[in-house]
Amino acid sequence: MSDPKVNELMEKVVSLCKRRGFIFPSSEIYGGINGFWDYGPLGAELKRNVKELWWHSMTRHREDVVGLEATIIMHPQIWRASGHVDTFSDPMSDCLLTRKRFRSDQIEPQSGTAYHYTGAQDAVSGKCVDEPYAVLLPAGKPPESARKIANQFYQARGLGQVELQGERAEKVENSQRFNPDNGSLLTEPRPFNLMFKTYVGPVPDEDNVAYLRPETAQAIFVQFKNVLDSSRQKMPFGIAQIGKAFRNEVTPRNFTFRSREFEQMELEFFIKPDEVVEALCGTVAKPAGPGHPGEPRPDWGWQLWHQYWVEERIRFYGEIGLPRESLEEYWQKPEELAHYARATVDLLFKFPFGTQELEGIAARSDFDLSQHERFSGKSQAVFDEELRTAWAKLAEERRQALWQRYHDARHQYLTKAGVPAQQAEQDAREDADGLARGQYIPHVIEPSAGVDRLILGLLTHAYGEVTTTDAKGKTATEVVLRFHPKVAPIKVGVFPLLKNKPELVAKAREVFGLLRSEMAVFYDEAGSIGRRYARQDEAGTPFCVTIDFDTLGETPELKDTVTIRYRDDGRQERLPIAGLKAHLLPLVR
Amino acid sequence: MSDPKVNELMEKVVSLCKRRGFIFPSSEIYGGINGFWDYGPLGAELKRNVKELWWHSMTRHREDVVGLEATIIMHPQIWRASGHVDTFSDPMSDCLLTRKRFRSDQIEPQSGTAYHYTGAQDAVSGKCVDEPYAVLLPAGKPPESARKIANQFYQARGLGQVELQGERAEKVENSQRFNPDNGSLLTEPRPFNLMFKTYVGPVPDEDNVAYLRPETAQAIFVQFKNVLDSSRQKMPFGIAQIGKAFRNEVTPRNFTFRSREFEQMELEFFIKPDEVVEALCGTVAKPAGPGHPGEPRPDWGWQLWHQYWVEERIRFYGEIGLPRESLEEYWQKPEELAHYARATVDLLFKFPFGTQELEGIAARSDFDLSQHERFSGKSQAVFDEELRTAWAKLAEERRQALWQRYHDARHQYLTKAGVPAQQAEQDAREDADGLARGQYIPHVIEPSAGVDRLILGLLTHAYGEVTTTDAKGKTATEVVLRFHPKVAPIKVGVFPLLKNKPELVAKAREVFGLLRSEMAVFYDEAGSIGRRYARQDEAGTPFCVTIDFDTLGETPELKDTVTIRYRDDGRQERLPIAGLKAHLLPLVR
């Protein structure tokens, strides 16, 4: 955030968003609420388009994915199973003087001299406070400043006339243990859970605690069996969901990039474990190299499915206007992976404030369903008749090898989950024995995207400025949002050349009516055509159509034609009204 | 809910919803969470279709409404301005013995004899508890039962061997003051706020309280000025929003009808006050009679706008499959209206459990914007150049009359809002003086619909059973969901006659591919055609297309034609594949 150019671009985008109704601060007339943003008329349409495209690419255009729309508040036990209750937290420290709270790992490191005290005594009453305390001063500042602050600290603990005890000075380098504002010692870092908490039902006690979901994924896992039983899907298949999620971020930042209320588009694609694939197909196909592996095949294991989804997601971004070159693929290193993850690829985008994650595509093994099986006591295994048949036909040696590999993976999971050794061994054996009956717990590939950061990516990627010089040498700079037509909130601007010629207006309204049954169209008759182009450029509208006197037949061969102007290159062409819809539809869908 | 037939239909619908993946209990593998429901694959599509149709009918197909997508968590002050913090509550009473909480006004009335006690004393220690208590017994039960319960009550307050004091028996009729389970006295009813509460930021104190919105409407009001400033809309115009809302209902009930997390589709349509309309047009048009008043005109006041929106909403329901006859229009009586409302119409639907509200269309005066103006200190007035000009030209008498009416309405609002008399008078005068400068606070018409109850209405309205008797005299009952094609989750089922004929399958896949770029299509090759029809009937699919040997050219004149079967009347017709899309598109959109 230190590059002024960067701040300048972000400032321009934020200001454009407000001015044109893409994004407003939430509750702005009340001074706003930190970490919450509203989408205005253009923003709401942009966001709807993106979600609609994701949803259709995931569900309607595939036969192996179905949708789900679950609640934000779910049974709290879900967040124990997922690990969020125990580990979804940031370290926090409080100032011992002012109680101000800091995110411990984001405190600007301080250097200087720390003055430590073992306690203090009241010079009048003799009362003692044993609590140790310390104040950090920048190099060169006299110890008196530290003593003054320490006095305040002990006064707050009931002493009147403070006599500090056991003063000791110490050189400190890059410490995050002191309040950068006043030098006061902070409390030890404590975990602060990022889930918003509330109570469901009339009694606000511990039995009724509930959380606002911090991700949409868990709803998919807990409804996996219901969806499987009701949708006639067979393994492998996926469940897609779009919805709000909430994280009580300590420091929301970078406009909508890290906010407290946001929206996710998540797919959980359930696959057969490699041992099952091998039992069925005799082998598990290996990736042939980088790039898209093509149409899914039955002999794909988790690696190919993972590669497939990485490439599918990159293709999706390309289709909505973020080409492969604008993205970075980051393969997490083994030491960065969550313990249950086999591989995770982050798709990064170069935001003005840094290259940051748009989406993560994780191969999460059978961790999630296994956790919910353990915590709910409900089997999450699927039954696969083909596996049962294939298993019976396997050569004994192969069967044993697959049994062992499946057993070992289950054993590893159970052990890491803290199941006692004997129980883990027994459960792992039972799980592996299930293969012979055609039973297994599916693995999962999870492409998980953030809607709001994608919208922000689209906005910053689309943002451009065009400087023009008029005949008098006067220059003007205008903003152009070069949205892909598929995501653009308005697809077409329709203008009569002049607003005071009823025939032009009538014809323009006719064209407007013709198009708007199929796409979002904006009718504008105010100001010069150039001004109207500029307004639409700023809204990201890819096409403008002008109805002029030639449309009305002034030049007979041009009767019932209009001028279409293309936003990105300013090109204009003449098209018959009759062919307009057919010309535009494939461009905007 | 006492009619067994009613329960039977609801049970059938609930069971179908689970079986076919329309609606599942949230968190079911964890035993569920009361008042929360998830939409499965078919339900999610049904709901998306309904929301999409509402959104398009409100925004794309109108030039005078724009969209908004605001956050669920907003500044808490908003809920003070709206009145929700103070008055959005149910009365609750706790059992003095078990602490169980009841909604006071929903307790089943009890009759019998109440045994009152003034207090009790410990026979051993002599300790006294002065707290009065009472127990209600049904007629004929001996007082000993009451004494036993009273003993428990005083024991819980620290007495060992209880000696009850001042027993007094009293006949009681239809009282809601006692726990129906054990007869124990309840606490006095206390208001229980229905908003879910949480804390935003790292410190969970009163400064950081926030609420999950109990309605989407307020977000529209607080962003009114931002939308007006950024969207190039002029009065009158509307802002539409779809989104989740939350109410901590004490007794969620009737499946998804009254749940704790639900979705709303709300429009706030901002209009000029009647005084402004009259200043501009010389008169305010009066409703000519019942029915749709036609295209909006500049001389419409709130009455015609209200009537217009009632009729528009009824039209909408008709278009998605709930005809006018299935709805009831309920005009709230003057004594039922909220104090700020000028008129409210509830659109009711005959659910199996009773005739209940689907949507309310309220004329809310300028109450909402006025409240936010007072609470935020930010002017919510609009400026209207035409009004300024017109006002200057008004005859003095007319001007005075309009000034007075506007003044009186503002004065009435301010007084009801609790503004002290002198201040109210001064503010009302200033507001009325604003008219001359072209300034006023808009009034609003609010059509507010619940998505989930509409989905439930569509499901119960569509539900039907067809009993067929086969050649052997065996009868079978099958479910048909007669959804309007526009809302149906799947529009077309595509079947090859036989799955083991590659040419049939290839052709069917071709037809499937042709249609699915434009609509939701389901390909099915399993089982007899009759079975496949039945499966689609149950999912509410309006059309099924079968590819047979004639399609392949067995009967040359039928080559490349298919059989289309209509769900509702079982009619079948032969159509060329080339014309299929064009035939279906207007039916499903």
Image: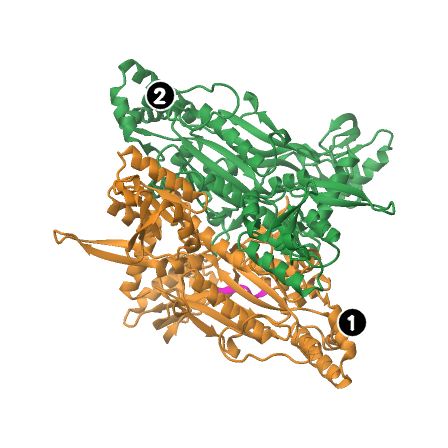
Chain colours: A orange, B green
Q: CA distance from mark 2 to mark 1?
A: 80 Å
The chain to which mark 2 is attached is B
Which residue: 47% across, 18% down?
B288
Horizontal side of residue B184 vs B407, given as left or right? right
Q: Residues within 10 Å of mark 1 (few under 14, many from 20)?
A: some
Q: Quadrant of residue B528?
A: bottom right
Question: Judging from the image, what secondary structure is the residue with disc 2 in?
Answer: helix
Q: Is residue A399 visible?
A: yes
Tell whether B427 sits left or right of A554: right
Start-end of magenta stretch: A86-91
Q: Which residue is mark 1?
A: A437
Please name the residue that numbered disc 2 is placed on.
B278
Q: For the point 42% across and 50% down, which residue is it?
A: A582
Quadrant location of the C terminus of chain A? bottom left
List x then y, in percent, for residue B87.
54, 34
Q: Is residue B272 magenta?
A: no
- Towards the viewer: B369 or B42: B42
Horizontal side, residue A437 vs residue B408: left or right:
right
